[in-house]
Image (tube, rainbow, N blue to C red):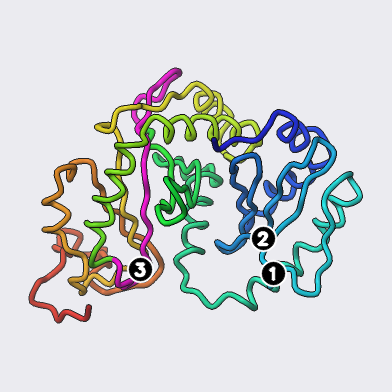
Amino acid sequence: MRELSESFMDALQHGFLSSIMQTVITDKDLDLHIRDNYLTLYYKGHSLLDLSEVNEKHYKVANHPKFFEEIVVSDLTDEETTADFLSKIPAIKENIIRCDKSSLEMEYEQLIIRANNCESLNSSEYYIVDRQYTVNGRDNRFDLMGFFWSNKGRHKDQTVAPCLMEVKFALNADIGQVSQQLERYYALVQTNIASIVTDLESTFEQRLKLGLYNQAPERLELMKTLRFARGIEHFQFLLILIDYNPYSRLLNWASLESLPFASQIKVFFGGFAIWEQKLESVSHRAIDVEWNPRLPDIS
């Protein structure tokens, strides 16, 4: 089950690990997620720290050796060892930057979490509870898990729709088979829905207690009363396409539309890459800027 023990939570909230939470909340480039009685701290989508509880006075530090190269980090047992670890975060970040040869996809995942969870001015309708959530082994790993909470008529004790979010960057070849991927994910959710929703609820509750949602005070009070729907018919499947080239035909809309749960699938386009057809003219706002099938395909 994805949750931390009471002693682990107490150490993070009030004990010698509380400075870690202060650092995470202050440094928005860091992203903390709860696992099965351990936590993972991410930077640019990569694990900067895995911290597991040995006992209430001893927390084991682990990470990929290449990120700790030439950096000696001891386990955390008191305020001094915790402060020592925090002082080495800049050096660990530098190692991650040096070693990172991947695309921006993982980094965008973290930016999505920041934009929706930690930027109070956004007042998003989608909130992220977990990343890299696994079901029946590491081969079945969901990018992001969260929920949809409509901005319309928010009040106490609402039931919200759980949401699985799959992130794809640019012209990732996997986009061509994303309907098959979502179909497989739907089957996994349907089979394991009780445990998935239980994990979401417990993780969300602990994330709120740790201050991992930077929201207006009145919104936070409402969030504490939210419940998660438990029927598969309430689940949303959100495909997030970052910097997807609008001239490409890589995304097979017909294949997505043919899925029996198509009504539960939504597609979001975002990112920073700019194409002319996605611009809106100030003087011609009525211009149709939808994709023109006569334009050349570059998939």
Q: Which mark is residue 67?
A: 1
The quarter holding residue 101 reads bottom right
Amino acid at dot 2: Leu
Element marked by disc 1: loop
Residue placed under numbered mark 2 in the picture: 48
Quadrant in which the N terminus appears: top right
Expressed as whole percent of the image width and height from the top left, the position of residue 175 reads 27, 66
Q: Which mark is residue 243?
A: 3
Whether residues under marks 1 and 3 lie with C-beta atoms below 8 angstroms apart, the answer is: no
Amino acid at dot 1: Phe
Q: Per the image, is 51 magenta?
A: no
Gap between marks 2 and 3 measured at Cα: 26 Å
Q: Residue most toward the right?
A: 80
Q: Residue at x 11, y 58 (%)?
A: 254
Residue 295, placed above or below residue 215: below
Q: Residues within 10 Å of mark 1 (few under 14, many from 20)?
A: many
Q: Residues within 10 Å of mark 3 (few under 14, many from 20)?
A: some
Expressed as whole percent of the image width and height from the top left, the position of residue 261 reads 18, 42
Whether residues under marks 2 and 3 lie with C-beta atoms below 8 angstroms apart, the answer is: no
Q: Residues within 10 Å of mark 2 (few under 14, many from 20)?
A: many
Gap between marks 1 and 3 measured at Cα: 28 Å
Q: Which residues are magenta?
A: 151-174
- 232 left or right of 163? left
- 65 left or right of 220? right
Q: Residue at x 36, y 54 (%)?
A: 166
Q: Of the two numbered discs 2 and 3 on the same chain, state the one appearing first in sequence.
A: 2
Amino acid at dot 3: Asp
Quadrant in which the C terminus appears: bottom left
Q: Of the two numbered discs 1 and 3 on the same chain, state the one appearing first in sequence.
A: 1
Residue 76, placed above or below residue 248: above
Closer-to-camera residue (142/27): 142
